[in-house]
Amino acid sequence: MDHRITICTSCKHKGTQCRPGYELIERLRAAIADAGDLVADDFEISGVACMAGCDRPCTVAYHGTRKATYLFGDIDPETDIDDLLAFARQYAVLEDGWCSSVDRPGKLRQTTLARVPAAIVAIEETAVRAS
Ligand code: FES
């Protein structure tokens, strides 16, 4: 598996004590398994206690070797599984993982909290600029 989706399990729905992260993990795992394409073999989905996006629950990160990392906020397990699945397909085929907001599916155009270049690519570009 070359890609990982990490979901915050500590985020609470605004104004409630409900923590939807585990539901989000279950729903996204089921959607990716049901998709029955290469995405199912290529992504691991796991939870983490916090990704410092606590004001924008739930947070979801996409990362992969030599790829940009994304952190999305305001993700709801009831309404956003299709967008997360669509972005997994898109992310899987982007060589460096980089894409602009207008190219991201649905809600993910407006809910990106961070897009961080891949560490390896960033180091290589710095070395080129320094030489
Ligand atoms: S509690 Fe979810 S990002 Fe901090």
Image (spheres, rainbow, N blue to C red):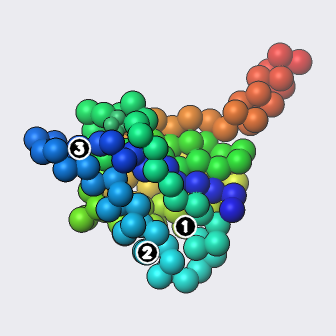
N-terminal label among 3 and 2: 3
Callout in the foreground (1, 2): 2
- In the rendered image, the quadrant that contains the C terminus is top right
- In the rendered image, the quadrant that contains the N terminus is bottom right
Pick the residue in front: 21 or 87. 21
**Horizontal and vertical percent position of residue 87:** 48, 61
Please identify the quarter of the rendering in which residue 20 is found: bottom left
Left or right for 116, reference 48: right
Pick the residue in front: 17 or 116. 17
**Horizontal and vertical percent position of residue 55:** 26, 33
x 84%, y 25%: residue? 128
Task: Point out which mark residue 12 bears.
Answer: 3
- Amino acid type at mark 3: Lys
x 66%, y 46%: residue? 67
- Check whether the beta carbons of the residues at disc 1 and disc 3 lie within 8 A of each other: no
Mark 3 Cβ inside 8 Å of ligand 1 = yes
**Horizontal and vertical percent position of residue 53:** 35, 34
Mark 1 Cβ inside 8 Å of ligand 1 = no
**Horizontal and vertical percent position of residue 75:** 30, 52
Callout in the foreground (1, 3): 3
Q: Secondary structure at mark 2?
A: helix
Task: Point out which mark residue 30 bears.
Answer: 2
Disc 1 and disc 2: Cα gap in Å? 15 Å
Mark 1 — residue?
Answer: 89
Pick the residue in front: 4 or 69. 4
